Image: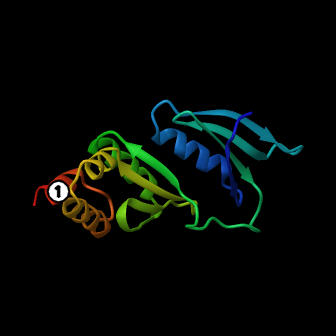
């Protein structure tokens, strides 16, 4: 059995899949299913070993912030690149969240955040979390500075 994330788009499934696979190293489009008239119905793609299915289902359903895709970034450079690509035509949110041009919500977070919080004294952890909530795109240097105050 395999569990996949199914994303319902209003006619932009292929565009979204191509955009996402262009941003993530090693990502790829695995399959395109077409209707009888040749239009793309679904696109199956892989991001970081996770399979996604993008479906052109129509306007009946919209994405909400109740669910988001979470990206753990190794470096600030990687975070900056992913953030820039996903916010292109989208909207920045607080604390590393954003909504991309397709309406999908993402959490773009440096991997070091969990390490900093996991080893911090309670007061330092509170400072780190306050710093995260004050940021849009998360800056690792700002997290370290908050810990060390």
Q: Residue furthest left?
A: 149
Question: In the image, residue 108 lies at what x, y percent?
Answer: 41, 53
Give the image quarter of residue 57. Answer: bottom right
Residue at 50% in and 59% down: 100
- Whole-percent x and y of residue 128? 24, 60
Image quadrant holding the C terminus, namely bottom left
| Residue that label 1 marks | 147
Q: How is the image coloured?
A: rainbow
Q: Residue furthest front?
A: 122
Q: Is residue 148 left or right of residue 53?
A: left
Residue 105: where, in percent of width, then height? 52, 60
Eyeballing the image, is 50 above or below 14? above
Question: How many other residues sit within 10 Å of disc 1, few (<14), some (14-19) or many (≥20)?
Answer: many
Residue 69, placed above or below residue 18: below
**Count of numbered labels shown in the rendering:** 1
Residue at screen point 58% across, 66% down: 66
Q: Is residue 149 left or right of residue 69?
A: left
- Quarter of the picture containing the N terminus is top right
Element on which disc 1 rests? helix
Q: Residue at position x 76%, y 45% from top?
A: 40
As rendered, which of 30 and 35 lies closer to the eye?
30
At horizontal 59% and vertical 50% (from top left) the residue drawn is: 16
Residue 43 location in percent, x, y?
70, 42
Q: 7 left or right of 28?
A: right
């Amino acid at each position: 059995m395999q569990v996949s994330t199914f994303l319902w788009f209003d006619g932009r499934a292929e565009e979204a899949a191509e955009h996402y696979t262009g941003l993530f190293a090693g990502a790829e489009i695995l399959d395109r299913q077409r209707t009888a008239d040749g239009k793309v119905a679904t696109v199956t793609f892989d991001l970081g070993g996770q399979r996604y299915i993008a479906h052109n289902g129509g306007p009946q359903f919209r994405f909400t912030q109740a669910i988001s895709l979470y990206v753990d970034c190794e470096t600030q450079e990687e975070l900056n690149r992913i953030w820039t690509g996903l916010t292109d035509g989208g909207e920045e949110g607080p604390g590393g969240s954003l909504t991309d041009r397709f309406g999908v919500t993402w959490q773009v977070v440096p991997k070091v955040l969990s390490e900093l919080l996991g080893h911090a004294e309670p007061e330092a952890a509170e400072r780190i979390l306050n710093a995260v909530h004050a940021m849009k795109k998360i800056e690792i240097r700002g997290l370290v500075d908050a810990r060390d105050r």
